[in-house]
Image (cartoon, rainbow, N blue to C red):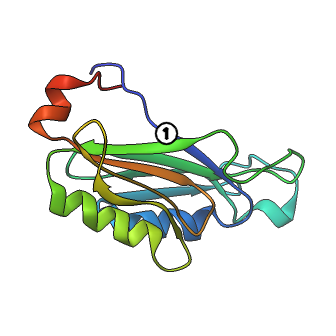
């Protein structure tokens, strides 16, 4: 199995809700483990909080997340964005609409970008920033993809 890079999101008391929301957006199989299942916290109030969640889609996307224990600091959405990119405009627009709707906000509308691709940015209702890019032949060949 090759090395992979997966975003891992931190939440405060709403990881279960957030990961279920992302499953409603992307589909796939969601596994959730609580602190209580693994005796990973001495605080009984944390027993049902998510220690580790992993969403794996049929298209190979993996998104992980967990609740931050009360003993640790937490700043929602700090220093992270998640990028979705590909060639399927309808699929990517669908993700963008779901992420920016239902309490989310559109930061940059999905439209033609200066580099030739269709691009948009939004923040979902959990404060996570998303960048959505539909590759065009011109954009894929004319700009570095990272």
Looking at this view, is 39 or 20 the one in front? 20
Residue extending furthest bottom? 102
Disc tally is: 1
Which structural element holds mark 1?
Answer: loop
Q: Name the residue under label 1.
A: 7
Residue 74 in the image: above or below residue 103: above
Q: Classify mark 1: residues with Cα within 10 Å, few (<14), some (14-19) or many (20+).
A: some
- Residue 5, given in percent of the width and then of the height, sits at 42, 28
Report whether 119 appears left or right of 138: right
- Give residue 17's quadrant in the image: bottom right
- Give residue 128's quadrant in the image: bottom right
Residue 87 in the image: above or below residue 20: above
Residue extending furthest left? 137
Report whether 98 appears left or right of 58: right
> At 69% across and 62% down in the image, what residue appears?
49
> At 70% across and 44% down in the image, what residue appears?
78
> At 33% across and 60% down in the image, what residue appears?
110
Residue 103 in the image: above or below residue 138: below
Looking at this view, is 139 or 13 the one in front? 139
- Residue 115, given in percent of the width and then of the height, sits at 28, 35
């Amino acid at each position: 199995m090759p090395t992979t890079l997966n975003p891992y999101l931190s939440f405060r008391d709403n990881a279960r809700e957030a990961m279920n929301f992302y499953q409603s957006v992307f589909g796939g199989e969601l596994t959730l483990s609580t602190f209580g299942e693994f005796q990973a916290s001495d605080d009984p109030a944390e027993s049902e909080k998510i220690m580790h969640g992993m969403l794996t889609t049929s298209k190979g996307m993996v998104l992980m997340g967990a609740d931050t224990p009360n003993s640790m600091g937490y700043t929602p959405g700090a220093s992270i964005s998640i990028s979705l990119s590909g060639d399927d405009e309808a699929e990517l627009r669908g993700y963008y609409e779901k992420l920016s709707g239902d309490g989310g906000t559109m930061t940059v509308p999905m439209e033609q970008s200066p580099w030739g691709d269709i691009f948009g940015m939004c923040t979902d209702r959990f404060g996570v920033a998303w960048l959505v890019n539909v590759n065009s032949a011109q954009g894929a060949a004319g700009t570095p993809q990272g």
